[in-house]
Image (cartoon, helix red, strand yellow):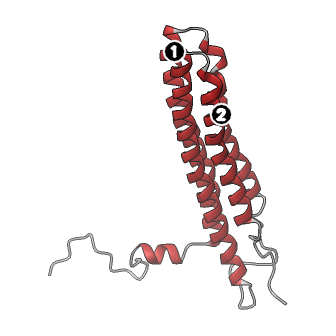
Amino acid sequence: MADNGLTCTSQYCNAGWSEILTHMSPYGYANFGIAFGLGLSVVGAAWGIWLTGSSLVGAAVKAPRIRSKNLISVIFCEATAIYGVIMAIILANKVKKPIDVDEEFGYDWDYLSFYYAGYGMFSSGLSVGLTNIASGVSVGIAGSSCAIGDAQDSSLFVKVLIVEIFASALGIFGIIVGIIQSNSCSFPIQAME
């Protein structure tokens, strides 16, 4: 069979995603956790603001009085991004550079704690980010309903706002779970004795 130029025959080729993911540094996993926590939280906030903002602008054409009081929905959506920023700061402070290591870790290095910290921070950031996407979308949908309902009947504002507060609580639950997940994650900074 002829070589088509797409097959790697070098010793530096990887066998697939399983080899890439198992040979990735725990620092890489930790930083991806920070990035996913922050990035997905901002995506959730933007999505919620888009949902509630478009309905707010459209409903304000019929009832201009709703513009200022329905901005609380946009603030609730923005809170999900703030939760991601808080979690990113907490996780970034847990990443520590090892001392007294030249190029490679020795046999006396605490590899279990090293990988546990990386995987734990990755799962913590991912869970916070995914929870904040769900929170941002649910707050956006509830805020959209609040704006449209308030334009029709002003007595509905407080009733729908309570639903929106419960939707925003999803983000708070997510950051609490993320803090609990990352609580025992600490990178070892020196070899075991």
- Report the residue at 52% width, 27% height from top: 144
Which quadrant of the figure contains the C terminus? bottom right
Q: Amino acid at mark 2?
A: Ile
Question: Which numbered tag is attached to residue 152?
Answer: 1
**Relative to 116, does residue 79 appear above or below in the rendering?**
above
Q: Is residue 71 left or right of residue 144?
A: right
Q: Depth check: 73 or 152 in front?
A: 152
Point 48% across, 73% down: residue: 20
Can you give x and y, in whole percent of width and height, for residue 57 in the image? 51, 17
Please state the horizontal and vertical placement of residue 176, each as a whole percent of the image: 72, 56
Residue that badge 2 annotates? 162
Amino acid type at image mark 1: Gln
Question: Residue 16 lies in what quarter of the image?
Answer: bottom left
Packing grade of label 1 (10 A; few <14, some 14-19, many >=20) is some
Q: Residues within 10 Å of mark 2 (few under 14, many from 20)?
A: few
Please identify the residue farthest to the right as the structure is shown: 193
Q: Quadrant of residue 189?
A: bottom right
- Residue at image location 81% in from the left, 79% down from the top: 190
Say left or right for 135 vs 62. Answer: right
Is 177 on the left-hand or right-hand side of 152? right
